[in-house]
Image (tube, grey):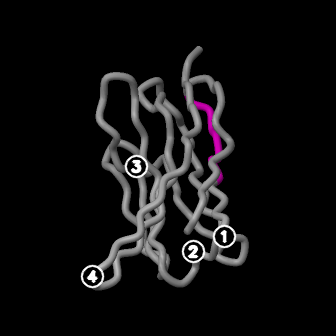
Amino acid sequence: QVQLVESGGGLVQPGGSLRLSCAASGSISSNYAMGWYRQAPGNQRELVAAITVGGSTNYADSVKGRFTISRDNAKNTVYLQMNSLKPEDTAVYYCNARWIPPGRQYIYWGQGTQVTVSS
C-alpha cells in the first residue's frame, strides 16, 4: 500500500512559478512509475507529466518546455516544477503511482492540490 500526499499548490499570477511535491508513504523507487495529472472544472482528468523508475519522462504538449517532473527516490518524493504558468493551467493537480507487474496492478492517487493562475 502506498499513500501519496501532495503539497505546494496555491494562487500564482500568470507567468509565475510553483513547485508541487508528492510524498509517498512507502518505497516507490524500485517499481513505481509516477505521474502528475490535473483536472479542471468540467474537464476530464488529464496526464500532465510522467516519470519512469529509470527517470525517463514524458509531458503533455501543453506543458512541454514549461513544466519539469523529477523524482528523489531516497526521499520517496516526486516533484513538478511549473514555470511560465498560464490561466489555463488552473486545476486540481493529482499525484499518481503506478506499478503493473504481470497479472496485477497497483495504482494509487493522492488527494489533490489546487493550483490557481490568476491576476
Q: Is residue 85 above or below residue 3?
A: above
Considering the image in quadrants, where does the C terminus appear?
top right
Q: Which of marks 4 and 3 is in front?
A: 4
Which sits earlier in the primary sequence, circle 1 or circle 2? 2
| Residue 4: quarter of image | bottom right
Q: What residue type is labelled 2?
A: Ile
Describe the element under mark 1 as helix, strand or loop: loop
Q: Name the residue under label 3.
A: 48
Disc 3 packing (10 Å; few <14; some 14–19; many ≥20): many
- The CA distance from mark 3 to mark 1 is 20 Å
Horizontally, residue 63 falls left or right of residue 119, namely: left
User: What x and y, as percent, mark residue 45?
Assistant: 34, 40
Identify the mark nearer the N-term, 2 or 3: 2
Per the rendering, the mark at residue 76 is: 1
Is tag 4's residue or tag 3's residue first in the polypeptide sequence?
A: 3
Q: Which of marks 2 and 3 is in front?
A: 2
For discs 1 and 4, the disc positioned in front in the rendered view: 4
Q: What element carries label 3?
A: strand
Marks 2/3 in contact by CB < 8 Å: the verdict is no
Residue matched to label 2: 28
Q: In this view, does 62 lie above or below 117?
A: below
